[in-house]
Amino acid sequence: MSTFMLAGMVFFIALGAPIAIAILAASIGGIAFFTPLPLVLVAQRLMTTIDSFPLMAIPFFILAGNLMEAGGISRRLVEFAKALVGGVQGGLAASCVLTCMIFASVSGSSVATTFAIGAIIIPAMIKHGYPKSFGASLQATSAELGVIIPPSIPLILYGVAAEVSIGELFVGGIGPGILIGAALILFVLVYCRINGWGKEDHVGRLPLLSATKEAAWALAMPVIIIGGIYQGVFTPTEASVVAVVYALLVGTIVYRAISWRDLIGVLRRSVIASTIIMFIIAAAGLFSFLITRAGVPAAISAWITSVVSDPAMFLLAVNVFLFLVGMFIETSAAIIVLAPILAPVAISFGVDPVHFGLIMVVNLALGMITPPFGVNLFAACQVAQVPLERIIRHLVPFVLVIVTCLMIITYVPELTLFFRNLAY
Amino acid sequence: QQALKLGYSLAPTSHYGVGATAMAEELERLSDGKFTIEQFPANALGGEREMVEGAQIGTVDIVITSTGPVGNFVPDTLITDIPFLFRDYEHAHAVLDGPIGQEILAQFPNHGLIGLAWGENGFRNLTNNVRPIRTPEDTQGLKVRTMENQVHMRAFQELGVLPTPMAFPELFTALQQGTVDGQENPIGVILSANFSQVQDHLTLTQHVYSPALIILSPIVWDGLTDEEKGWFEEAAAAGAAAMREKVREDADNGVATLKEQGMQVVEDPDRAAFEAALQPAFAEFAERFGQDKIDAIRNTGM
Amino acid sequence: MLTALKLVDRAVFHVTLTLAMILLVTMAAVSFYQVTTRFVFEQPSTWSEVTSRSLQIWMVYLGLVAAFRTGSLMAVDMLQRLAPKTLKIVVICAIAGLNLGVLAVMFWYGWSMAERVRFQTLAGVDNPFTGGGISIAIVYTAIPVGAALSIVAVIARFAEEVSRASRGEPVNEAEARARLETEGA
Ligand code: NA
Ligand code: NA
């Protein structure tokens, strides 16, 4: 049954059906042809999978990201980042990474990060003479940080699926987030110098002091969100709704940038974007129920433990496997299906579940920029108005940078666990 | 030859796992291998509410669950949520295995479920990070995570506690960061969730006795002969007995372990004072569940 | 006849999207209320969590209509972009058929599930008017309702795509989506 379902799913996806529909169609076929289960199971899983409080962070982070863009918070963060690191050749590209890092510390979603920052930085990069396709691939890659630096929806999903403390996972994301951010900044500075891009990046920057002053309300946001979680004011999930309220208040009262009309547009986009993701998650919930009930997870973990004997080999195998999965499957769906299977095996190999969570999330976040199916690519292409085929050339070096970071994160657990052990 | 899927929310090593294994062995023995049980621990088949619903629609065959979600299906089970209803383990077992408990199980088929046997989670106890709790005065103003259970929340409100429903995966962090001050669970759960790392005080309030239920899908039940039905009941009884034994063991060793892990334990709080403080809530429960039924439980074995 | 169908399509799209937007705002308001009552007023709310979860389910299945209508659901559309005209139309038909089939299952069995669970109550909330429980069926109903309305959206979208493909017009998805979202606003 599982083979049939997997083959069916891949076929429908290749045909061009919506991912969620492909997953559902394959699952419905599986139920009807291979099990005695009643089809009301479809309705049950479509409801119960998303009947989850932690999952509410998804619509809220998407809404917060859209409000931040409409309210001028994103623009001020970009100005601040430019004032800080934008003075050298390639400085604008480096500012893109830095802005994404700051934005990531209030947003838990990469797609939200791509839309909110890309809408501002990609046009700026084009104006400064960068190729459009480079801007789009840089934005897509940097936005990955949205789910690695806390807060993070995939880390919440992993925490729920593998029953690991979400607070610990969040702290664990700090080290890997800084590593990837720093690596990307370093890489773009060199890459821009080689290609001769961004020679005029120092032009039109605000002085640091006035940029900081302008961005003060925007910069206070990460302090409030992260501070609020660790001061016990709200839970990691509730942080997402606090971000919504803060972005709304700053955008309307302080910056006076959001009109009623804007607000309606923001809500429209947020509803549609949330629905798209939640529907995939709901569909994945049905799929994972069926393969769990068929005993596949137990069989896979038994197989892995029999084939692989040491933790280092296990982690390498998992990374290769997840990279392939990430090419084709959406991050949230992959985590819901795979975390309950892989986390117990990792624990049995002596891998810390928080460390393993970060490996999974960094790897699957990489899947957001690997063709053929990468949500960040889709979002960045949409923002930059450039077809997918054209940005692939610039993606290769970025993927290599992230893969290198992933290997460091995998084999230097201290990078993840240092802050965790400090805080817990 | 029929392989049944049995789901529960805890680890295979927990009292649910022990009960499931005992039930599986007994059923296989009685049926001479005709019925086997495949276990799905740790919510692999969904949360407790979903698994009970799954038994109803036939996607899960057997469920071991706390009574928490069952009240939404079979309202008669809610009566066990009343605080300080059971004096001790012997009393609870006498009630649930006697006519009162069996009468509640007999209600299950009316709600599309088969209740095979009463298992156990044990008495729930209160932990917090603010102060040692001995009397109802000590609980004033504490934010305590409770289950989404109207009876529990009502009782805690009467004690001046601020009951806060919260998803279990968020609870550890919430306790650590002080989003809530405390929580209440049986010793086994406090131990397995490592709450001693984030909670200073444990009071053996034993405020609610938490039974468990072994539930069978009516779709399986309706296909059984009378003899086979007897096997299932007998096997479930064996599972429940094993579960209770494991709970007792865990509770005995658990308190000592939690002390070693640094928790301050109040072993003999003023339970009479708590009961007295709950009188207004008891009056409401009497109206809701019937004073006669409550008295029948209280008088069992007296 | 055709105008009537177009009218139904537009009405369904705008009504469901507006409702979903209101649900999103309500969800946010209820969750924020939860944070403030617990932290500021030290009076934790007991009903807010289950309420916002239930609203979320309705938001998703009503929002699905707009997602189908605007063609926003995530898909790998390489085949469609690269295929010659005839094959392209075949693929569009196949996908629409698949969508309709899945939505039909969601509608039929969603309805049957809602009926089966109508005596089960939601945990954590009582009906504020009667003091009794609230049936979980009101949450489950989101699935058949959303699926039925999505069927309208899929058919409307299908008609548009086929006529476009047969004219051999390339479409700028982002622009088409934006136009659809804002028209009549
Ligand atoms: Na983030
Ligand atoms: Na990918």
Image: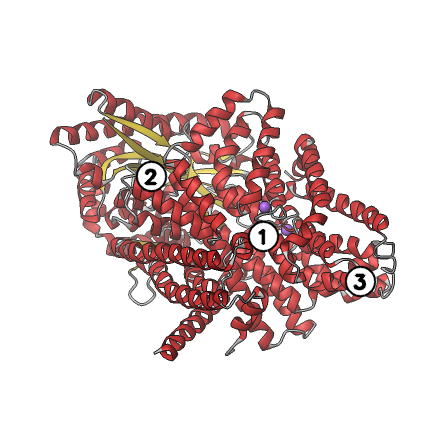
Q: Give me the disc on residue A212.
A: 3
Q: How is the image coloured?
A: secondary structure
Between residues B107 and A135, which one lies in front from this camera angle?
Answer: A135
B18 lies left or right of A273 = left
- Image quadrant where residue A313 sits: top right
Residue C55 lies, in percent from the top left, at 43, 61
- How far separated are the C-alphas under marks 2 and 1? 39 Å
Residue A175 lies, in percent from the top left, at 70, 41
Mark 1 or 3, closer to the camera: 1
Between residues A297 and A403, which one lies in front from this camera angle?
Answer: A403
The chain that hosts pointer 1 is A
Specify which label sits upstream in the sequence, 1 or 3: 3
Q: Which residue is mark 1?
A: A375
Ligand 1 closer than 8 Å to label 3 CB: no
Between residues A120 and A23, which one lies in front from this camera angle?
Answer: A23
Mark 2 or 1, closer to the camera: 1
SS at circle 3: helix
Mark 3 or 2, closer to the camera: 3
Residue A49 lies, in percent from the top left, at 42, 49
Ligand 2 closer than 8 Å to label 1 CB: yes
- Image quadrant where residue A356 sits: top right
Quarter placement of the N terminus of chain C: bottom left
- How far separated are the C-alphas under marks 3 and 2? 55 Å
Residue B95: tell me if it is visible.
Answer: yes
What is the three-letter code of the residue carrying label 1? Val
Q: Which residue is mark 2?
A: B65
Tell me the crowding category of disc 3: few under 14, some 14 to 19, or many 20 or more residues within 10 angstroms, Cα based: many
